[in-house]
Amino acid sequence: MKTGTHRVRLGAALVVLAGLVAGVAVAVRLPGGSPWSLGLQGFALLAALFAVYGLGAWLVASLARGRAAVVTLGGAVATQIAALTAPPRYSDDLYRYVWDGRVQARGIDPYRYVPVASRLVPLRSPELFPSSAPPGHCVGSGPDVTAACTLINRPLVHTIYPPVAQAYFWLVHWSGPKGVQVFAGVAAVLVTAVLIWGLPRVGADPRLAVLWAWCPLVAIEAGNNGHVDVIAMIPTACALVILGARRTLTTTRAVAGGAVLGLAVATKVTPGFLVPSSVRRKGLPLLASLCGVVAVVYLPHVVAVGRGAAGFLGGYLNEEGYDDGRRFAVLDLFLPQGWTSAGAVVVLAATAVLVWWFADPTRPWRGAVVMTGITLLVAAPSYAWYAELLVLLVVFSGWRATPWLAVALAGYAGQLGERVGWSYGAAGVLVVAAWSVGRLRTARTPGAREEPVTAETGGVAESWDAVPVDVILPCLDEAGALPFVLSRMPSHYRAIVVDNGSSDGSPEVAARLGARVVHEPHRGFGAACHAGLLAATADVVCFLDCDGSFDPADLPKVAGPVLAGRADLFLGQRRPTSRGAWPPHARLANRLLAYRIRRATGVALRDLGPMRAARREALLELAIADRRFGYPLEMVLKAADAGWRIGETDVPYAPRTGKSKVTGTIGGTVKAVGDMRRVWKAATE
């Protein structure tokens, strides 16, 4: 992008940021009686803020990464400062935070007494117990209760917040309500910094951090309302980076990720929505460490107060109407009230199972954003701060997940006195519509990019038609197939036929048809592939069976993502064109092997396809040692261990010309299984 265009977009982003900051300041400072502070007008104001935020995020995505990081972080600071200019607007939860911290500072377990307990009268102060308070905040005397008016909500019930949150309250209680707001705002900025640092480590664009940093919900619920949810987002973001880093997930990292996620769950239970999509890889050690951390932090409180350590959680769910189904506002639009509770259980259980089964284990946030979004749609809470987790997951999931932000906005309808059924229902319709459009576009344009065009791509799709690609064709007695294979080679794709000891004149046929012929006297599929790799000179190379089962015209489907820099290794997933193209026993064995690869490495492959593309120098650096049938498997395992971006696309697979040397003979099948078993053992020990 030209320097002038860069400056224009940077200037536009700063102008939009200024408008967003002003909008946040207005939203939190509106007088209580203003028509823009409640109802549909208030919701429209917040929706307008979200629109400005969306425009700003789009502009930041077009900036160079260095500038984008500075603008994103600066915007995070500015929006939080704007939110801090007023007392809490939509919530009074932070007064409970200060109180719980004060109680702990006196050596009393926070789960033992309700705020107006007689035992705690000496801890009262005017900032939390004024002479007058909002309706419902003044209580009379009773058994073990001393009359008082307080800013603390639900003064007659025990605290609901988990132990790590309680530790945070103890750390910050001395600063008072305004201090809690400041600490929450600082935490939101810290999450932004974690995202800018961590997103590249999971193969994502760091500019996505703007979706968190500039989000009006994050500003209002952190810097203004001071909600503890933002504290939970720090370990949640760290856990996602640990579990999704671009290298093989070891047991040690799974334990570390589970432990950090356990800290998040023990701060606010909502990060538990990550579990179904995270346990596909190393599930046992991950769950063990997560549960262990939660148990450890709860243990002192269980020892002190027994079952009272559960706090007001059960009572809260009943108070909100989840016990009798009154609270499931979206389901209530379609089901009789008596059926909504059962319907909610069925929908959420089915979602959890489907997310666990289909989610990409290398990118747990993609399944988690669905799990969290559907849970919010079903539960339809009247409190928008529960959606902070959803905003964070959208950041990791990328631009295609941004329709879920409508669900985050929908929660404000309840806080502004409107029924939430219509807001969550509309958000759900938007998400489904966006998903449907995305599926249609993907079907029409195979290999379409997942991320928007940015400064690095120049704003237009690049053409790779003129870039040379070397195609390595291991060959053993394939004279009958070579004419078809070589005649279908795309322009600028250069055939390298590696003869592995043919006796049917294959080298002569290949040379006559214009291919470069390399001789590899050492028998073995891997030996032939490696000889071709050493002979190649192009930056990107493809591997292709020389038996006519693949159409070389499909090679650009596989090489394109590598040439474009969107993948490091890309494979063709075989789609048989006829019943006899792929023998059932070979197909089953391949599926089982792909399943083991997914479980061991997290690489979401369905086929260990022989049509593949990668960069030549990078392949040489992998130092693949096998020279037999284990070569393709070792390539994938070592690439996964090196953190490569690995993908696949469908390619037609036809019956081969002549008899197969692997699946067509018992001896060949036995050799291939033995070679792959040896490679697997060496790679996973």
Image: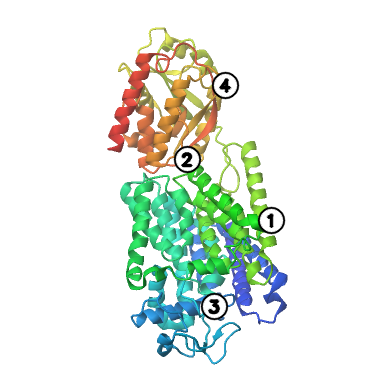
Tell me if residue 612 comes above or below residue 253 in the rendering: above
Q: Is residue 46 left or right of residue 249?
A: right
Tell me if residue 504 comes above or below residue 317 in the rendering: above
User: At which x and y percent is residue 96?
Assistant: 48, 78
Please name the residue that numbered disc 3 is placed on. 92
Judged by depth in the image, the label closer to the viewer, 4 or 1, is: 1
Quick one: label 2 or label 3, which is nearer the N terminus?
Answer: 3
Q: Nearer the viewer, residue 183 or 525?
A: 183
Three-letter residue code for mark 1: Pro
Q: Is residue 588 left or right of residue 384?
A: left
Badge 1 marks a residue whose secondary structure is loop
Badge 3 marks a residue whose secondary structure is loop
Please name the residue that numbered disc 4 is placed on. 577
- Residue depicted at x 41% and y 54%: 241
Q: Nearer the viewer, residue 609 or 665?
A: 665
Three-letter residue code for mark 4: Thr
The Cα atoms of the two marked residues, 4 and 3, are separated by 64 Å
| Residue contact between numbered discs 3 and 1, judged by CB atoms under 8 Å | no
Badge 1: few (under 14), some or many (20 or more) residues near its Cα, within 10 Å? few
Badge 4 marks a residue whose secondary structure is loop
Please name the residue that numbered disc 2 is placed on. 567
Quick one: label 3 or label 1, which is nearer the N terminus?
Answer: 3
Tell me if residue 43 comes above or below residue 112 in the rendering: above
Judged by depth in the image, the label closer to the viewer, 4 or 2, is: 4
Q: Which mark is residue 336?
A: 1
Scheme of image coloration: rainbow
